[in-house]
Image (tube, rainbow, N blue to C red):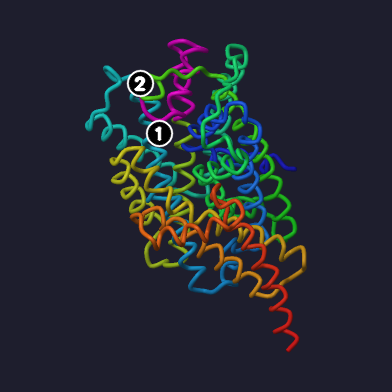
Amino acid sequence: MSKRTLFIGFMLFALFFGAGNLIFPPTVGQLSGTNFLPAILGFIVTGVGLPLVGIIAGSFSNEGFRSEARRISPLFALIFMVVIYLTIGPFFAIPRTAMVSYEMAVLPFLDGGIETFSSKIIFSVIYFGLTFYLALNPTKLVDRVGQILTPLLLITIVLLIIKSFFDLNTPITEVSAQFEKAPFFVGFSEGYQTMDTIAAVAFSIIVLNAVKATGLTSQASIFKQASIAAIIAGVGLGLVYISLAWMGNNYPLTEAEAAGGNMGTSILTGVARLTYGEAGRFLLSLIVTLACLTTAIGLIVAVSSYFNEIYNKISYRVYAVIFTLISFILASQGLSSIIMGAVPILLIIYPITIVLIVLIFIDRLLKGMPNLAFQLPIYVTLVISAISVILGYLDDSGFKASITSLLNYLPYQESGMGWMVPAIVALVVGLILGKAIKRN
């Protein structure tokens, strides 16, 4: 492994480790109580395992996921990729990084900790201005993020983690209702909100380009170095997630703190204050700002590069300006609104992305499988996920009750995983029918 590959791994860690990666693991730890272990393992699968596998899957081809998605259909590939990039980009993930930074790094230092429109706008202008400047030149992403910002981020996180291990020693025993049954699958679903698995679709291209910039030309060598970089990032993410969740599982959150806003934010703020006193607020502010900034930079680069490739009459820099401005405008809605708006789309996009990643690996394992084996599992997953989400927005009626009762026959439907078994069945049917059609 070269030194450059190590820095690419550091860069990938920082790109993944953003807003959701900070606030969601402590919440899982707090709510899971004595079911902490299965809950955090489920979270790790979607928060670390699938993103890591996603980067590796995207490294099989020079075009990343685009060539694989075309096997379902060219129209599906275009719509799927556009939705992915807009979801992890200006519509949800980038604005969320700004608002998490504002609420955790700025708001505690304001008079009375009260949010004001002027303070939010001033912070957003500075935040997005810096993000845009650092994203202007994609070729310098490894140098700016991997070699400079990531080491700073790791140092600050380690300082908080080490001190908390000495100061927190009373695990939470109460288990919230949602984690009483199937805590693994609930943690699995909670990991959706990090957006890392769908971010892997975008970041895989950044990793491929960074590896190619080292001078490698053979696909085998590129795949090997990209895989090593993904493993480096995955190990780092896994250790940090477990540590953050452990903090949440051992921090005695008061009712006043729980009612004060986002639970993950309250836990981290409380832990920082408990471990380092007043200095802890500054340490947490630095962690949050670095984590969110590096992710925002990577997402602006990824989204702008993708849209420049599919419509190059608009330059990369113009796209970067457009997506930065959209992110700035949407960030004014606040963190809660951004998270609430993202959830329905994530519940549809995430299962499709997971199934596509798994299909790519099965295709390589079988050394090629019919396109029908790609199409059927994806379409089945899309239909079940979309119906499950739509039902949540319908008023109570006989129709809703009938469809809900049918869906409840699916294994793990209550945990948001009702698509899993049908997708497996659809894969088997696709393999059998695809081979039969090919023979005929």
Disc 1 is placed on an element classified as helix
Which stretch appears magenta?
260-288
Q: Residue 120: which quarter of the image?
A: top left
* Quadrant into which the C terminus falls: bottom right
81 to the left or right of 119: right
177 to the left or right of 184: left
Q: Residue 378: which quarter of the image?
A: bottom right
Q: Is residue 264 magenta?
A: yes
The Cα atoms of the two marked residues, 1 and 2, are separated by 12 Å
Image coordinates of residue 422 in percent, x first then y, are 62, 63
Vertical order, 41 against 155 (above or below): below
Please give the residue where the numbered disc 2 appears in the rendered image.
108
Vertical order, 210 against 236 (above or below): below
Query: What is the three-letter code of the residue carrying label 2?
Result: Pro
Q: Can residue 207 be seen in this snapshot?
A: yes
Disc 2 is placed on an element classified as helix
Image coordinates of residue 55 in percent, x first then y, are 63, 52
Image coordinates of residue 148 in percent, x first then y, are 54, 33
| Disc 1 + disc 2, Cβ < 8 Å | no
* Quadrant into which the N terminus falls: top right
Vertical order, 159 against 304 (above or below): above
Query: What is the three-letter code of the residue carrying label 1?
Result: Val
195 to the left or right of 91: right
Magenta stretch: dominant secondary structure: helix
**Which mark is drawn over residue 100?**
1
Q: Residues within 10 Å of mark 2 (few under 14, many from 20)?
A: some
